[in-house]
Image (cartoon, rainbow, N blue to C red):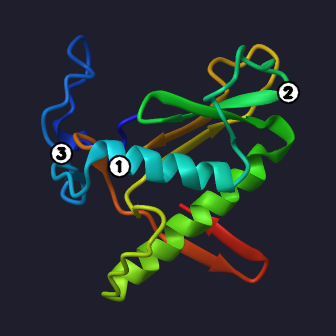
Amino acid sequence: ESWGFMCPVHTPDGAPCGLLNHLTAVCDVISNDTKDQDEHFREISGLLVKLGVNSVYGLLKTPPLSKYLPVLVDGCVVGHIMSSRAASMVANFRKLKSDALECEEKGIHSSARLVDPLTEIAYIPYERGEKYPGIYLFSNTARMVRPTYLLREATGESRA
């Protein structure tokens, strides 16, 4: 799971395999917090609600996993989204992220930017027997990140 973050040349084989101690040249460790975490959490939760997530606040019970996926931000459940709408919501969020990344690369720093370009998005669709289905967003510090590239194709966009 850390391929590209750790240097494979310095990864030992055999019994100590997995004891990695050298980061690759293109890996960055997120170490600065530019926003108050509570404010950031409220902003990203509000954006997710606008993208179709049902807020967890006010729910008396957890909806069925076969119909709703949990949405977590930095390990905290912020809501649920209908399984049928999850892929669309993730695509919209990734589009906002890529727009923010393009602005950053062009040197445009806007206070109206909705998503931090370093936010990680993991989407695990519900399938019977699949472990941990849901949408996971990570935006806090102490994460290893590597560059991602937006590849444009004639049929649309795909993200590496």
How packed is label 2: few (under 14 Cα within 10 Å), some, or many (20 or more)? few
Sequence-first tag of 2 and 1: 1
Q: Is residue 114 left or right of residue 29?
A: right
Position of the N terminus by quadrant: top left
- Label 3 sits on a secondary structure element that is loop
Sequence-first tag of 2 and 3: 3
Question: Does 62 appear above or below 111?
Answer: above
For the residues labelled 2 and 1, the Cα–Cα distance comes to 30 Å
- The residue carrying mark 3 is 23
Q: Which mark is residue 39?
A: 1
Residue name at image x 76 percent, y 13 percent: 129
**Residue 122, image x, y percentages:** 56, 41
- Label 2 sits on a secondary structure element that is loop
How packed is label 3: few (under 14 Cα within 10 Å), some, or many (20 or more)? some
Q: Which mark is residue 67?
A: 2
For the residues labelled 2 and 3, the Cα–Cα distance comes to 40 Å
Foreground mark, 2 or 3? 2
The residue type indicated by label 2 comes to: Lys
Q: Are marks 3 and 1 in contact (CB under 8 Å)?
A: no
